[in-house]
Amino acid sequence: MKDKKILNRDYTYHLNTPNNVIWAYQQSFFNNEECDRIINNALENSSIESYLSDGIVDNSIRKNRVIFLPSHDDRYRWIFEKITQCTINLNRQFWNFDLSFLETLQFTIYNQEQDFYSAHMDTTHNVPEQRKLSLIVQLSDPDSYIGSDLQLHSYGMEFFNTIRNRGTVVAILS
């Protein structure tokens, strides 16, 4: 009995799932025309000063403006449908979470030189549903601005820049 193992590796079948993937992306998911359409449709609405998940404005953590795109507005239905498709595909390929909804889409505007969003965890602790993935869509041409790189890190590793090509969707574990 001294050679008894808790997990018998001889009979274990490895699923080869990338269970340590913290982010994934799909390039050119939205084409240039679609990116322009999203920008133009969103900018038809009034923006508000961004706030943290508890509703508090804290310009030491985040300074930019946002526009929320509601799912019940027919102008945005196609965006929700495409984002849903991308979410399902990336989730199936990398994580296999049980996903049941998308939150209202947030269109974030960084147009002032001092606009930013500091390092943070993209999760909310005061709601019964748990956010599992966050998706970011690169709508602007990366050559049209300086800075504002989407940087990630995990478990104390160095920060690294993600893909910045226009139309790319980046999915991040929340």
Image (spheres, rainbow, N blue to C red):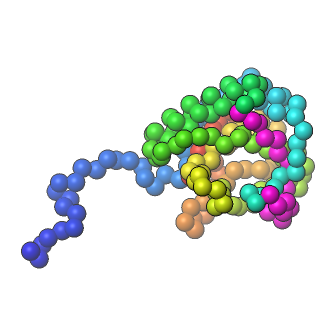
Q: What range is drawn magenta here? A: 55-71
- The question of residue 79 being in magenta is answered with no
User: Is there any visible trace of residue 159 in the rendered image?
Assistant: no
Q: Residue at coordinates 83% horizontally, 28% vertically from top-left?
A: 40
The percent coordinates of residue 86 (x first, y second) are 57, 34
Quarter of the figure that contains the C terminus: bottom right
Rendered image quadrant of residue 43: top right
Residue 155 vs 27, above or below: the answer is below
Q: Nearer the viewer, residue 174 or 72?
A: 72
Q: Residue furthest bottom?
A: 2
Q: Residue at coordinates 49% horizontally, 51% vertically from top-left?
A: 21
Rendered image quadrant of residue 108: top right
The percent coordinates of residue 36 (x first, y second) are 78, 27
Residue 153 vs 146, above or below: the answer is below
Classify residue 146 as left or right of residue 81.
right
Q: Residue at coordinates 78% horizontally, 41% vertically from top-left?
A: 68
The percent coordinates of residue 17 (x first, y second) are 38, 47
